[in-house]
Image (cartoon, grey):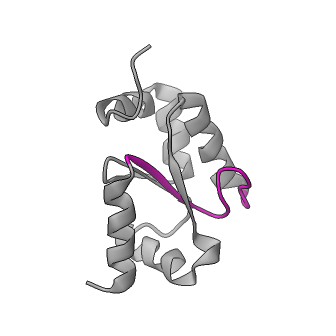
Amino acid sequence: MSDVKAKIQELVNTNKVVLFMKGNKSFPQCGFSNQVVQILKKEGVPFETVNVLSDPEVRQGIKDFSNWPTIPQLYVNGKFVGGCDIVLEMHANGELGKELQAAGAKTAG
């Protein structure tokens, strides 16, 4: 396993909710990343962010890791959930809340 893949695997495994994005939760540097940050804040869950702009290896590595071509990428409980469009849709239909709850990241109610 490459160092980058191992690093990404470690981040995914050690954080219940982690968002690979451009910028960070305090200062998103792209509209799509910002949309996902706002959704996670609305869901009321603690989450970590990884700024792919600060590490070109991770920026490319995360695309290879998930086999998904775009950023941001959301992982919940070690599982790739999706990018901005999928997260928006899941939030709108309530699936994201259920997924976060099932992962133990969100309390009921």
The kind of secondary structure the magenta stretch mainly shows is loop
Residue 40 horizontal side relative to residue 38, left or right: left
Towards the viewer: 88 or 100? 100
Residue at the farthest top position: 109
Residue at the farthest bottom position: 2
x and y percentages locating residue 70 in the rendered image: 54, 66
Q: How many marks?
A: 0
x and y percentages locating residue 24 in the rendered image: 65, 57
Q: Where is 56 relative to 15, above or below?
A: below
Residue at 39% x, 35% y is: 105
Residue at 31% x, 52% y is: 79
Residue at the farthest front position: 14
Residue at 67% x, 62% y is: 23
Towards the viewer: 54 or 88? 54
Q: Which residues are magenta?
A: 16-30
Residue at 53% x, 30% y is: 43
Q: Quadrant of the N terminus?
A: bottom left
Q: Quadrant of the C terminus?
A: top left
In the rendered image, residue 18 lying in the magenta stretch gets the answer: yes
Q: Where is 25 relative to 61, above or below?
A: above
Which image quadrant is residue 108 in?
A: top left
x and y percentages locating residue 21 in the rendered image: 59, 61
Residue 21 horizontal side relative to residue 66, left or right: right
Q: Where is 95 relative to 2, above or below?
A: above
x and y percentages locating residue 30 in the rendered image: 72, 59
Which image quadrant is residue 42 in?
A: top right
